[in-house]
Image: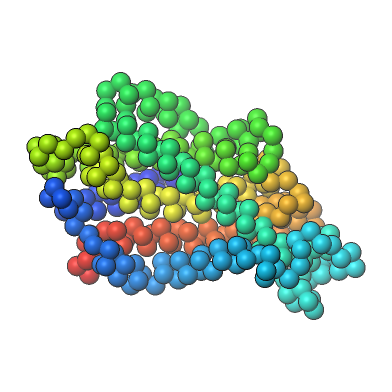
Protein backbone atom coordinates (compact mmCIF):
# COMPACT_ATOMS: atom_id res chain seq x y z
CA UNK A 1 0.00 0.00 0.00
CA UNK A 2 1.30 3.48 -0.85
CA UNK A 3 0.96 4.71 2.73
CA UNK A 4 3.20 1.90 3.97
CA UNK A 5 5.92 3.05 1.59
CA UNK A 6 5.49 6.61 2.84
CA UNK A 7 6.00 5.38 6.42
CA UNK A 8 9.23 3.68 5.39
CA UNK A 9 10.42 6.79 3.57
CA UNK A 10 9.62 8.99 6.55
CA UNK A 11 11.38 6.56 8.87
CA UNK A 12 14.46 6.64 6.66
CA UNK A 13 14.39 10.42 6.79
CA UNK A 14 14.18 10.34 10.59
CA UNK A 15 17.13 7.98 10.81
CA UNK A 16 19.20 10.14 8.49
CA UNK A 17 18.38 13.23 10.54
CA UNK A 18 19.55 11.61 13.76
CA UNK A 19 22.40 9.51 12.36
CA UNK A 20 25.04 12.09 13.16
CA UNK A 21 23.64 13.18 16.53
CA UNK A 22 26.06 12.92 19.39
CA UNK A 23 25.92 15.76 21.85
CA UNK A 24 23.55 16.36 24.72
CA UNK A 25 22.73 19.96 23.89
CA UNK A 26 22.58 19.68 20.11
CA UNK A 27 21.06 16.34 19.16
CA UNK A 28 20.39 17.63 15.67
CA UNK A 29 23.47 18.66 13.68
CA UNK A 30 21.27 20.49 11.22
CA UNK A 31 20.77 24.24 11.19
CA UNK A 32 17.79 26.07 9.73
CA UNK A 33 20.03 27.87 7.22
CA UNK A 34 21.26 24.78 5.39
CA UNK A 35 17.85 23.16 5.61
CA UNK A 36 16.34 26.16 3.84
CA UNK A 37 19.19 26.21 1.33
CA UNK A 38 18.71 22.51 0.59
CA UNK A 39 14.99 23.02 0.07
CA UNK A 40 15.54 26.04 -2.18
CA UNK A 41 17.85 23.97 -4.39
CA UNK A 42 15.05 21.50 -5.04
CA UNK A 43 13.21 23.23 -7.87
CA UNK A 44 10.39 20.70 -7.99
CA UNK A 45 9.64 20.99 -4.26
CA UNK A 46 10.00 24.77 -4.36
CA UNK A 47 7.61 24.99 -7.31
CA UNK A 48 5.16 22.73 -5.47
CA UNK A 49 5.36 24.94 -2.37
CA UNK A 50 4.71 28.09 -4.41
CA UNK A 51 1.83 26.43 -6.24
CA UNK A 52 0.21 25.19 -3.01
CA UNK A 53 0.66 28.58 -1.34
CA UNK A 54 -1.09 30.17 -4.33
CA UNK A 55 -3.94 27.65 -4.18
CA UNK A 56 -4.40 28.25 -0.45
CA UNK A 57 -4.40 32.02 -0.96
CA UNK A 58 -6.97 31.75 -3.76
CA UNK A 59 -9.40 29.64 -1.72
CA UNK A 60 -8.99 31.86 1.35
CA UNK A 61 -9.83 34.91 -0.77
CA UNK A 62 -12.74 33.13 -2.47
CA UNK A 63 -15.34 35.75 -1.40
CA UNK A 64 -13.21 38.47 -3.00
CA UNK A 65 -11.91 36.87 -6.18
CA UNK A 66 -14.62 34.36 -7.11
CA UNK A 67 -16.40 35.77 -10.18
CA UNK A 68 -19.78 34.31 -9.17
CA UNK A 69 -21.50 32.67 -6.23
CA UNK A 70 -20.82 28.92 -6.35
CA UNK A 71 -24.54 28.12 -6.35
CA UNK A 72 -25.80 30.80 -8.72
CA UNK A 73 -27.35 29.03 -11.73
CA UNK A 74 -27.99 30.42 -15.23
CA UNK A 75 -30.21 27.90 -16.98
CA UNK A 76 -29.57 29.36 -20.43
CA UNK A 77 -25.86 28.50 -20.09
CA UNK A 78 -26.15 24.90 -18.89
CA UNK A 79 -23.27 22.75 -20.23
CA UNK A 80 -21.53 25.85 -21.65
CA UNK A 81 -17.99 24.77 -22.64
CA UNK A 82 -14.75 26.35 -21.38
CA UNK A 83 -13.81 29.76 -22.84
CA UNK A 84 -17.45 30.81 -22.93
CA UNK A 85 -17.63 34.60 -22.64
CA UNK A 86 -17.59 35.52 -18.94
CA UNK A 87 -17.06 31.91 -17.88
CA UNK A 88 -13.50 30.86 -18.65
CA UNK A 89 -13.96 27.26 -17.43
CA UNK A 90 -17.53 26.90 -18.65
CA UNK A 91 -20.69 25.96 -16.78
CA UNK A 92 -21.93 22.76 -15.15
CA UNK A 93 -25.14 20.79 -15.63
CA UNK A 94 -27.14 23.33 -13.60
CA UNK A 95 -25.62 26.42 -15.21
CA UNK A 96 -23.22 27.21 -12.37
CA UNK A 97 -19.82 28.75 -13.06
CA UNK A 98 -17.13 26.06 -12.92
CA UNK A 99 -14.30 28.39 -11.90
CA UNK A 100 -16.29 29.75 -8.96
CA UNK A 101 -17.22 26.26 -7.78
CA UNK A 102 -13.61 25.08 -8.05
CA UNK A 103 -12.43 28.02 -5.95
CA UNK A 104 -15.10 27.58 -3.28
CA UNK A 105 -14.80 23.80 -3.42
CA UNK A 106 -11.09 24.12 -2.69
CA UNK A 107 -11.92 25.51 0.74
CA UNK A 108 -13.73 22.34 1.73
CA UNK A 109 -11.38 19.90 0.01
CA UNK A 110 -8.22 21.43 1.48
CA UNK A 111 -9.68 21.53 4.98
CA UNK A 112 -10.76 17.89 4.65
CA UNK A 113 -7.22 17.07 3.54
CA UNK A 114 -5.28 19.15 6.07
CA UNK A 115 -7.34 19.17 9.29
CA UNK A 116 -7.63 15.37 9.75
CA UNK A 117 -3.91 14.96 9.06
CA UNK A 118 -3.12 17.61 11.69
CA UNK A 119 -5.44 15.98 14.24
CA UNK A 120 -4.14 12.47 13.52
CA UNK A 121 -0.54 13.70 13.73
CA UNK A 122 -1.15 15.18 17.16
CA UNK A 123 -2.93 12.09 18.47
CA UNK A 124 -0.49 9.70 16.82
CA UNK A 125 2.48 11.62 18.19
CA UNK A 126 1.18 11.36 21.76
CA UNK A 127 0.40 7.65 21.44
CA UNK A 128 3.70 6.90 19.70
CA UNK A 129 5.75 8.78 22.29
CA UNK A 130 3.98 7.01 25.15
CA UNK A 131 4.29 3.58 23.56
CA UNK A 132 7.90 3.98 22.48
CA UNK A 133 9.23 5.65 25.63
CA UNK A 134 7.21 3.87 28.32
CA UNK A 135 7.38 0.40 26.75
CA UNK A 136 5.98 -2.60 28.59
CA UNK A 137 2.23 -2.82 29.15
CA UNK A 138 1.38 0.70 27.83
CA UNK A 139 3.23 -0.13 24.62
CA UNK A 140 1.37 -3.42 24.23
CA UNK A 141 -2.06 -1.89 24.87
CA UNK A 142 -1.53 1.04 22.51
CA UNK A 143 0.02 -0.93 19.67
CA UNK A 144 -2.47 -3.82 19.81
CA UNK A 145 -5.33 -1.30 19.71
CA UNK A 146 -3.79 0.48 16.73
CA UNK A 147 -3.13 -2.86 15.04
CA UNK A 148 -6.86 -3.58 15.07
CA UNK A 149 -7.49 -0.44 13.01
CA UNK A 150 -4.34 -0.96 10.98
CA UNK A 151 -5.56 -4.38 9.87
CA UNK A 152 -8.25 -2.82 7.68
CA UNK A 153 -7.46 -1.10 4.36
CA UNK A 154 -7.45 2.66 4.87
CA UNK A 155 -10.07 3.55 2.27
CA UNK A 156 -12.46 0.74 3.20
CA UNK A 157 -12.26 1.64 6.89
CA UNK A 158 -12.96 5.30 6.09
CA UNK A 159 -15.99 4.28 4.02
CA UNK A 160 -17.25 2.02 6.82
CA UNK A 161 -16.92 4.74 9.46
CA UNK A 162 -18.50 7.39 7.25
CA UNK A 163 -21.32 4.99 6.40
CA UNK A 164 -22.19 4.54 10.06
CA UNK A 165 -22.24 8.29 10.73
CA UNK A 166 -24.52 10.91 9.21
CA UNK A 167 -23.14 12.05 5.83
CA UNK A 168 -21.60 15.50 6.00
CA UNK A 169 -18.53 17.66 6.31
CA UNK A 170 -17.76 16.62 9.89
CA UNK A 171 -18.15 12.94 9.04
CA UNK A 172 -15.32 13.13 6.52
CA UNK A 173 -12.99 14.72 9.06
CA UNK A 174 -13.82 12.16 11.77
CA UNK A 175 -13.51 9.15 9.46
CA UNK A 176 -10.21 10.26 7.95
CA UNK A 177 -8.72 11.17 11.34
CA UNK A 178 -9.54 7.75 12.78
CA UNK A 179 -8.02 5.82 9.88
CA UNK A 180 -4.82 7.89 9.98
CA UNK A 181 -4.02 7.57 13.68
CA UNK A 182 -2.63 3.99 13.42
CA UNK A 183 -0.24 4.98 10.61
CA UNK A 184 1.05 8.07 12.36
CA UNK A 185 1.18 6.30 15.74
CA UNK A 186 3.28 3.46 14.34
CA UNK A 187 5.72 5.88 12.75
CA UNK A 188 5.95 7.96 15.95
CA UNK A 189 6.66 4.84 18.02
CA UNK A 190 9.36 3.66 15.57
CA UNK A 191 10.96 7.09 15.61
CA UNK A 192 10.80 7.27 19.42
CA UNK A 193 12.48 3.89 19.83
CA UNK A 194 15.21 4.89 17.39
CA UNK A 195 15.81 8.26 19.06
CA UNK A 196 15.78 6.76 22.56
CA UNK A 197 18.65 4.45 21.59
CA UNK A 198 20.84 7.34 20.40
CA UNK A 199 24.00 8.26 22.37
CA UNK A 200 22.86 11.80 23.18
CA UNK A 201 19.82 10.43 25.04
CA UNK A 202 22.07 8.25 27.20
CA UNK A 203 24.28 11.28 27.80
CA UNK A 204 21.26 13.34 28.82
CA UNK A 205 20.17 10.64 31.25
CA UNK A 206 23.66 10.50 32.71
CA UNK A 207 23.57 14.26 33.13
CA UNK A 208 20.43 13.95 35.24
CA UNK A 209 17.76 15.00 32.75
CA UNK A 210 14.23 14.19 33.91
CA UNK A 211 11.79 12.11 31.90
CA UNK A 212 9.79 15.18 30.94
CA UNK A 213 12.96 16.95 29.82
CA UNK A 214 13.99 13.95 27.73
CA UNK A 215 10.59 13.82 26.05
CA UNK A 216 10.10 17.52 25.48
CA UNK A 217 13.64 18.71 24.82
CA UNK A 218 15.33 15.79 23.10
CA UNK A 219 12.96 13.10 21.85
CA UNK A 220 9.95 15.05 20.54
CA UNK A 221 11.95 17.60 18.49
CA UNK A 222 13.78 14.72 16.79
CA UNK A 223 10.58 12.76 16.10
CA UNK A 224 8.72 15.70 14.59
CA UNK A 225 10.74 15.97 11.32
CA UNK A 226 9.78 12.42 10.32
CA UNK A 227 6.12 13.13 11.12
CA UNK A 228 6.27 16.40 9.20
CA UNK A 229 7.49 14.63 6.08
CA UNK A 230 4.88 11.91 6.41
CA UNK A 231 2.03 14.32 7.20
CA UNK A 232 2.81 16.43 4.14
CA UNK A 233 2.51 13.44 1.82
CA UNK A 234 -0.63 12.30 3.66
CA UNK A 235 -2.44 15.56 2.90
CA UNK A 236 -2.41 14.83 -0.82
CA UNK A 237 -3.67 11.29 -0.24
CA UNK A 238 -6.42 12.49 2.11
CA UNK A 239 -7.64 15.02 -0.45
CA UNK A 240 -8.20 12.06 -2.75
CA UNK A 241 -9.85 9.99 0.02
CA UNK A 242 -12.06 12.90 1.08
CA UNK A 243 -13.08 13.51 -2.52
CA UNK A 244 -13.86 9.82 -2.83
CA UNK A 245 -16.16 9.94 0.21
CA UNK A 246 -17.96 12.95 -1.27
CA UNK A 247 -18.17 11.13 -4.60
CA UNK A 248 -19.90 8.23 -2.86
CA UNK A 249 -22.31 10.56 -1.07
CA UNK A 250 -20.77 9.93 2.37
CA UNK A 251 -19.13 13.32 2.77
CA UNK A 252 -20.04 16.85 1.76
CA UNK A 253 -23.58 17.03 0.44
CA UNK A 254 -24.84 19.08 -2.55
CA UNK A 255 -25.22 21.92 -3.24
CA UNK A 256 -22.07 22.65 -1.22
CA UNK A 257 -19.14 22.99 -3.59
CA UNK A 258 -16.48 20.31 -3.10
CA UNK A 259 -14.12 18.80 -5.67
CA UNK A 260 -15.35 15.27 -5.00
CA UNK A 261 -19.00 16.31 -5.14
CA UNK A 262 -18.35 18.13 -8.42
CA UNK A 263 -16.91 14.96 -9.94
CA UNK A 264 -19.89 12.97 -8.69
CA UNK A 265 -22.42 15.43 -10.10
CA UNK A 266 -20.63 15.56 -13.44
CA UNK A 267 -20.52 11.81 -14.05
CA UNK A 268 -24.16 11.77 -15.19
CA UNK A 269 -23.38 14.27 -17.96
CA UNK A 270 -19.93 12.97 -18.87
CA UNK A 271 -20.75 12.46 -22.54
CA UNK A 272 -22.53 15.80 -22.96
CA UNK A 273 -20.12 17.98 -20.94
CA UNK A 274 -16.88 16.15 -20.05
CA UNK A 275 -15.32 19.32 -18.62
CA UNK A 276 -17.75 19.20 -15.68
CA UNK A 277 -16.03 16.04 -14.41
CA UNK A 278 -12.58 16.48 -15.93
CA UNK A 279 -11.74 19.87 -14.40
CA UNK A 280 -12.31 19.02 -10.69
CA UNK A 281 -10.68 15.63 -11.25
CA UNK A 282 -7.63 17.33 -12.72
CA UNK A 283 -7.44 19.75 -9.80
CA UNK A 284 -7.56 16.85 -7.31
CA UNK A 285 -4.69 15.07 -9.09
CA UNK A 286 -2.50 18.16 -9.47
CA UNK A 287 -2.93 19.37 -5.88
CA UNK A 288 -2.33 15.87 -4.49
CA UNK A 289 0.85 15.47 -6.53
CA UNK A 290 2.05 18.90 -5.37
CA UNK A 291 1.76 17.83 -1.73
CA UNK A 292 3.74 14.67 -2.53
CA UNK A 293 6.49 16.67 -4.23
CA UNK A 294 6.56 19.05 -1.26
CA UNK A 295 6.92 16.11 1.11
CA UNK A 296 9.82 14.72 -0.93
CA UNK A 297 11.53 18.10 -0.82
CA UNK A 298 11.11 18.39 2.94
CA UNK A 299 12.49 14.88 3.41
CA UNK A 300 15.60 15.75 1.42
CA UNK A 301 16.01 19.13 3.10
CA UNK A 302 15.85 17.58 6.57
CA UNK A 303 18.54 15.03 5.65
CA UNK A 304 21.87 16.13 7.23
CA UNK A 305 23.70 14.76 4.19
CA UNK A 306 22.18 17.62 2.21
CA UNK A 307 24.57 19.97 3.96
CA UNK A 308 27.49 18.40 2.11
CA UNK A 309 25.96 18.75 -1.34
Query: At 46% across and 41% down in the image, what residue appears?
Result: 120
Can residue 80 be seen in the rendering of this structure? yes
- In this rendering, the answer to whether 136 lies above or below 308 is above
Image x and y of residue 84, in percent: 79, 76
Instruction: Give whichever of 247, 102 is nearer the camera.
Output: 102
> Split into 4 quadrants, where in the image is the N terminus?
top left
Query: At 22% across and 39% down in the image, what residue appears?
Result: 214
Image x and y of residue 275, in percent: 73, 65
In the rendered structure, the answer to whether residue 25 lies left or right of residue 293 reads: left
In the rendered structure, the answer to whether residue 280 lies left or right of residue 285 reads: right
Query: At 57% across and 52% down in the image, what residue appears?
Result: 111
In the rendered structure, the answer to whether residue 187 lies left or right of residue 151 reads: left
Query: At 27% across and 23% down in the image, what residue appears?
Result: 136
Tell me the quarter of the picture where residue 85 sits.
bottom right
Image x and y of residue 208, in percent: 12, 36
Residue furthest right as drawn: 76
In the rendered structure, the answer to whether residue 206 lies left or right of residue 169 reads: left
> Split into 4 quadrants, where in the image is the C terminus?
bottom left
Instruction: Give whichever of 168, 283 is nearer the camera.
Output: 168
- In this rendering, the answer to whether 274 lies above or below 146 is below
Amino acid sequence: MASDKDIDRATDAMRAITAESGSVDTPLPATSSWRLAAFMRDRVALSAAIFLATVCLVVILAPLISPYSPNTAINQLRFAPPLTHGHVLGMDEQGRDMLSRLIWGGRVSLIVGILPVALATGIGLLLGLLAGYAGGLPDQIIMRTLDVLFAFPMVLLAIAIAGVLTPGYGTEIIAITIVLVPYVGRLARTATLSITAMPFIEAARAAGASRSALLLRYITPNVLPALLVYATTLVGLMIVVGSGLSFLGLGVQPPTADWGTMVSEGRSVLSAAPHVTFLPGLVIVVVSLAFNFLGDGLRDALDPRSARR
